[in-house]
Amino acid sequence: MQHSIKQALSTIFVDWSVISAAPYDKDTLIEIESVLKQHLKRHNLAESLTLKETLLTNLADCKGSISEKMMAFVTQNIGDPSLSDDELQTDYQELLNELQRVNNLATDLQTIADVTQLIEDNGAPLWAKKLRYEPHNNSQDTLASDNWQQIWRIARLTSFIDSIDGRKELVQLAKTRGNLEVNLARLYQEAITKRAWLKVAENATPNVRASLEKYRSAIMRIGKGTGKGAHYYRREAREASAGASAAIPCWIMPHYRISESLPAEFGSFDLVIIDEASQSDLTALPAIMRAKKVLIVGDDKQVSPEGVGLDIEKIRNLMAQYLSNQVPVYRSQMSPDRSIYDLFKVVFADSSVMLKEHFRSVAPIIEFSKREFYNHELIPLRKAKPSERLDPPLIDIYVTDGYRIKGSDINPSEVRFIIDEIKTLVSDPAYKGKTIGVVSLLGNKQAHNIMEILNKELDEAVMTAFDIACGDARTFQGKERDIMFLSLVVAPGAAHAQTRDTFAQRMNVAASRARDRMYLVRSIELDELSQADHYRAELIKHFQAPFMQNEEQVADLRDKCESPFETEVFDLLVERGYRVVPQVKAGAYRIDMVVEGENDNSLAIECDGDRYHGPDKWDSDMQRQRILERAGWKFWRCFASTFVTRKKEVIQDLLAELERLEIYPITTDTAYSSSYVESRIVTTVDAPQIDIETETDA
């Protein structure tokens, strides 16, 4: 018995030495170990049991069909009294034969392992897995398709695109940039606020506080400045401000308050800002004399002093007498009909900066001024929220029975239409919270009559709620309204051409006060105007085609998409129920599409085709985006290559961004209109009876 065991062990160990030298995996070694365990357990020897435990330990970390059979043979067959020696010997021989077969395939299997590992490492893990584990049973190779080279090339290109695709990084950088800008703005604000209050606290001694209270009391007593004691209180205010000025970092007041409120000291302020300087005349000089530095903010294309009724000859004599020591080119700018802006524009001609960004009016409204007065240099950036937007923004009203009362700047029919339209607006809940203004483009008599009638026909609460105001262009300079009415006043046979620069200034101001909607109420056709009446003619043309071209009416918004990429993004959003508007104008720019939701939420989507938006365009694209972000836009961008290769991931990212901004699919029957203008032809009835005072053209 001992002899047969030793002989079996000798046979096994001979096979072990052969196999262990071969370049093969653990399965082969495990098979031999299993056979050894079979013999040891079969004869139930103590020594065999020790060897069995060793073999079981070695088998524990092995996997595969052969290993599983070996484990079962060692644990179940060896030592089973129901099995004969012949049966065990047969099983043992089969295991040895399988072991020998696998050993003979060791070189080929190692080749498969090496090649499939290379295939996996180079981007085809699924194919490598099939080559490793799926047997080849047919004469035709089903694991390598006929177009494997094309597939391989596509996979390589995809891998390359993935390696250079920085979408996630760009998205993260954009978020980081946004957070940093918000934090930086907050820190600036906090620093400035704290420094200002620190300075106030440092300077606010008991004497300063007493002077502040004395100044406040004196200003209140001055009132309108017409009382008998006004001169006394002015002096008291000046005395008090001398002791209080050190504690106040910033003074804001009209020109006429300066001399009566502040000490007459040269350079007492580090910086003086003159706002609306185009309306300021030489009365602003007291403010300028108190400045170490001065900043003049104005627009010579808007209303400026006119010097109406002044004796020109007398003015010239005074200028020659008192301004003889001034440089002639400067002296000419110091007359009463010139503004402080005119003066500084000449004196500091080499240090002016044009502010080009316009935030008040939507683009179709401001386009007239942009084209006629600013040589297209303005950049409209007003982003009207869905709740603010009034479509269309321009309404052209032709009053067929309009006429200008002879000898007066009043058109009763236009008055009647404007009053009736305002009454309609204030009674419509959709216009709740809007503000309304009326500008007469010929004098102010028309506006005064409209205001008088409105005060009679509307409650005071309504007038206050809608902040209704009427006047000429000068009345509205520096002001704005959501809805503005422009009354042209003139009519056929009573329209004298206006060619003076002052008329152009008034026209510019009047046409740039509306935020969301502007009415032109006229009683004259374009061909009834004089050829010299340029600005009236151009204004009428503007209300026909604001961008100087026929606007194409596109019934299907999908047709506005400019690329297959945009169309696909548009379709997937519309299919999910979102309201999408392609090719949205935003100032001087155009956004590929905008998704709108409830509560004025919206998202600008930029579909960047790789051909037209390569690295050379990124700087300009981001600069453009930052400008629009300052106007309130929020952006989501995607490259076409990323969309094609990772469509599901990109779509999920877009939908997640929409949800983050609380933009959800909406159901609405309201179709978006691409038209900027609505034209109406009206005939008024019951035109108001107006007391006439003969006037001439302004």
Image (spheres, helix red, strand yellow):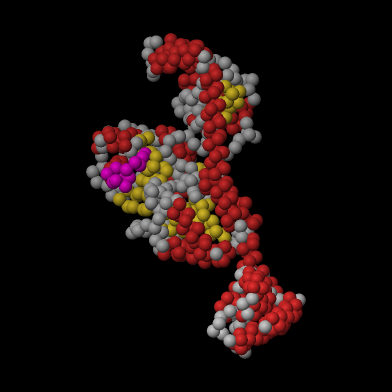
In this rendering, the answer to whether 169 lies above or below 181 is: below
Magenta span includes 609: no
**Percent of width and height locating residue 376:** 54, 47
Who's the residue at 41% across and 46% down the image? Answer: 516
Q: Is residue 140 visible?
A: no
Quadrant position of the N terminus in the picture: bottom right
Determine whether, in the image, residue 275 is placed left or right of residue 100: left
**Percent of width and height locating residue 101:** 68, 84
Determine whether, in the image, residue 202 is placed left or right of residue 108: left
Quadrant position of the C terminus in the picture: top left
**Percent of width and height locating residue 146:** 62, 82
Pick the residue in front: 436 or 278.
436
Figure quadrant of residue 285: top right
Who's the residue at 52% across and 24% down the image? Answer: 197
Who's the residue at 50% across and 32% down the image? Answer: 276
Pick the residue in front: 222 or 179.
179
Judged from this view, the residue extending furthest toward the left is 686
User: What is the number of callouts on the image?
Assistant: 0
Pick the residue in front: 269 or 156.
156
Q: Is residue 233 visible?
A: yes
Who's the residue at 37% across and 13% down the image? Answer: 227
In this rendering, the answer to whether 479 lies above or below 331 is: below
Judged from this view, the residue extending furthest toward the front is 1
**Percent of width and height locating residue 451:** 31, 35
Pick the residue in front: 38 or 407.
38
Magenta span includes 435: yes
What span is in magenta?
425-437
In this rendering, the answer to whether 571 lies above or below 333 is: below
